[in-house]
Amino acid sequence: MNAVNAKAESLSFGPFNLSVGQRLLARDGVPVDLGARALDLLVALTLAPNVVVSKQELISQVWPDVIVDEGSLRFHMTGLRKALGDGQDGARYITTVAGRGYCFVAPISRSSHLRQDAAASDFRHALLPGRLDRMVGRDEDVITLAEKLMASRMVTIVGVGGVGKTTVATAVAHQLSPSFSGAVLFADYGMLSDPGLVPAGIASMLGLTVGSNDVRPSLIAYLRDKQIMLVLDTCEHLIDAIADLAATIIDAAPHVFLLATSREALRIEAESVYRLDTLACPPDDPELSTEEILAYPATKLFVERAVASGATLKLNSEDARVVASICRKLDGMALALELAARRVESYGLHQTARLLDQHLTLGWAGSRTAPPRQKTLQATLDWSFGLLTDIERTVLRRLAVFVGDFTLDAALEVLSSSDIPASTIFDAIDNLVAKSLLATHPLGATMRYRLLDTTRAYALQCQTVEDRKGLNARHATYYQRWLEQFGPDWPTLSTGPERLPYFVSINNVRAALEWAFGEQGDIAVGIRLAAAAVSVFQVMSLFPECQRWSQRALLAVVEEFKGGAEEMHLQAGLGISQMYMQGGRDTPQIALRRALSIAEERGNAIDQLRILGPLHMFNMRVGDFNAALEYARRCSSIAFTVDDPATVGLGHFFLGNSLHFTGDLGNARIELEAATRSDPQPRRTPASYVGFEGKHLAGGILARNLWLQGFPDRADIQARKTINDAAKLDHSLTLCIALLGGIAVFLWRDDVQSAEEHIEWLVSRAGLNSLSPYVSVARGFEGELAIRRGDVKLGIDTLRRCIEKLHTSTYEVFTTMLELSLVKGLAVIGEYEEAFARINQTIELVERNGDLCYWPELLRVKAALLLATQATNDAEACLVSSIEKGAEMGANAWELRSATDLAALWIADERLRDARLLLEPVIERFDEGLETADVAAARSILKKLS
């Protein structure tokens, strides 16, 4: 069975049904909560029933990129058997073959199908142009292409421009859409000119974070287990970049199907080329009857389009031959036929043919060896252009300033000038639509317009000096104002159709920036436009573009803009982009501090908040928790002066976040709970560049805070609620932050299974969105789990690598927590010298940098090292200090651990009364979480003393 068919399998055994493609196990129709690794094991075993699968083979399938031992395999196999109820009531599913491996022994029934029900149950990004009500002469092409695509997974429709490649590809996509449960993404590359944005275009439309210069790893990671259809339209001008991306997708994502349109083949190994010929035309044969002539696809299309445009045609034999002559002269080109047919209502059939003859003759003169596209379509456009009024020609030429879709408002504002009033432009656009030189399609509640690519290229060639006068500047200025007006909406947009109108307009922003900073551009316009684009690039996570244009504009900043709002936004854009992309301490901080200085000079509260928030995050990332707290206090103070609930919520979160890490747990809880209670934000939030809400970020930190304060059950509930809420938002950064908080709680509660499941989720989501520091933290958590399972060397090596990566990227938020795990692991294998060195250095850094929430635990772990090396007096002093620090900050959880350890030490020294007096008041504070490891250990010791 090949991989694609295997993924389409639905397997039934006992009361269970396993959908391999959907990765869902259900018992009697109810989903079974099963970890990702356990599910991988089940799939591997059920796809080879009654066959002994070796342990090594299972490890290589389930952990292809990670080195693990058999302990991990046994751990997940135990969980899988428990979930299946293996051995209960006589049920047997998996048997162990001693010395060999495992075998799935239960009877299995199979049903193989394309994952129609599950292919896109949560696919929110399906974007597909409307299908023509009637498509002439292409039914056989559509059927053949659909079969060819399903058989080969990669088909390129190749043909000359205007032949109808996009129309046919759209029809194929509509026909196959049910097979993918609507999971079809239509990517129109005619709007892009930069090869470097090929993968970023798809990634952004899918809602993925573009967090680095190379977004391909994130895109491939997202597509790897998806069954969707991608239509890559108009590839010829980006052929190399698209071919490379397509080849990578085909190799790495076995369930993704690609349909491309291009004027030349991609020439990759997996490609199946389908050459789309022009529509068949009747030959110049006097023996053909009228019925035979009109039965050809080209003549059918011409007649139908002419009638649809208002012409009255009652064709006799002579008229039919005129139609046949027109079709032959246009080489059966669909676009050219449609353009000509729409003129029949105005000029009549015979006059249309004469006009066409004259213009095509001029177009072909001396160029018989040129490609058909250049001969026929160029001539058709010449002819069509000649039929326009002077005003229509001027408007058409000037509309070429737009890249891709544009609105009527945009056209009226950009094209209006002293020589053409808005009312005249409106009428001209209406006529251009009627004459098929402007395509229209509704997007949401707004009609969008677009020049076909060939028409736009033709119009650009025809532009005059008078046309270009002020046109590009008005175009750039319009999109500057558009960004300023609609930029605050972007954080609230979902992916897919809701984001599409904004996404396509960004192409005009890019084009305007290219012009503004080009040889014929206007630097001042470019600076204003780049500054307005910062917040949108940030919210869309297009950090490379934000950095590029911020740098370019800052290099060009003249005296007029120094110290103004434009420089402030550009410095902020540069600093935030560098923070997320390159990390580091100096360069991002210089830019952000310059932005804050300008904001303070301007005295605008919103300006200051937009910089203080990123400065808080920057200092948290680099581990300067004291500085982060100062920025958080300022941010919170200013937020209360702004009449915006979302801004106030962010202020509560920033302050609560800092107070938590600096050890002020009581006040941290007040702020974090205020953030979680904040009202839903209005649609427009001007105070943040980053696109998230304090309400959703605060929950994960609040869960940590609750655990530290001695509420383990409430912490668990809060962690799970926050993660579930974040998952519904479809905002990766928010989800990753929620997972980080939740995993910490699960580890502290010693809930290994929950920690493991959520760590896998964090690795997947963070890796998918280029949030590499979060991946390193998650891998570090995996190292701690390995130590807990007894694979101490693997855990230590993993933690060392992860901590080093985090230091390199200056992401220090969680390094103290990981250092604690590493020191515990070193103690297990007796590496006390390194353990002491690390714990002492970490304590020193905590005292200096301010993440004091870990201080009591650091002292407790150091005490354990001292006890192991017979330094009992020093160990006792450390534990006493730890208890004092825990009590001081209200960290009952840390205090309980240290009190338990000190009580055990005193019991060994026969100081039983002191041990009881120490432990009793601490344990009495805990009225929940009685089954957790820490509370249970303390109660066990106290029981011995009673």
Image (cartoon, rainbow, N blue to C red):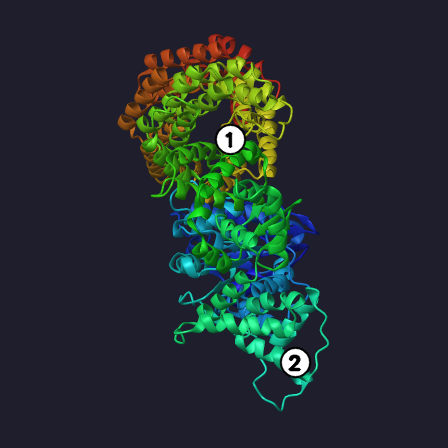
Question: Which label belongs to residue 750?
Answer: 1
Q: Residue at x 60, y 51 (%)?
A: 428
The quadrant the C terminus occupies is top right
* Residue for badge 2: 320
In this picture, is 533 found above or below 86? above
Q: Quadrant of residue 814?
A: top left
Looking at the image, tell me whether mark 2 or mark 1 is earlier in sequence order.
2
- For the residue marked with disc 2, what is the amino acid? Ala
In this picture, is 535 found above or below 250? above
Q: Could you say where residue 701 lies in the image, as x and y percent from the top left?
A: 52, 25
Query: Which one is in front in this view, the residue at disc 2 or the one at disc 1?
Result: 2
In-front residue for pair 864/60: 60
Q: Residue at x 64, y 58 (%)?
A: 434
- For the residue marked with disc 1, what is the amino acid? Asp
Q: Quadrant of residue 79?
A: top right
Q: Residues within 10 Å of mark 2 (few under 14, many from 20)?
A: many
Total of numbered circles in the picture?
A: 2
Find numbered disc 1 in the image and state the secondary structure of the residue it sits on: loop
Q: Could you say where residue 374 lies in the image, as x and y percent from the top left?
A: 44, 68
Q: Is residue 503 visible?
A: yes
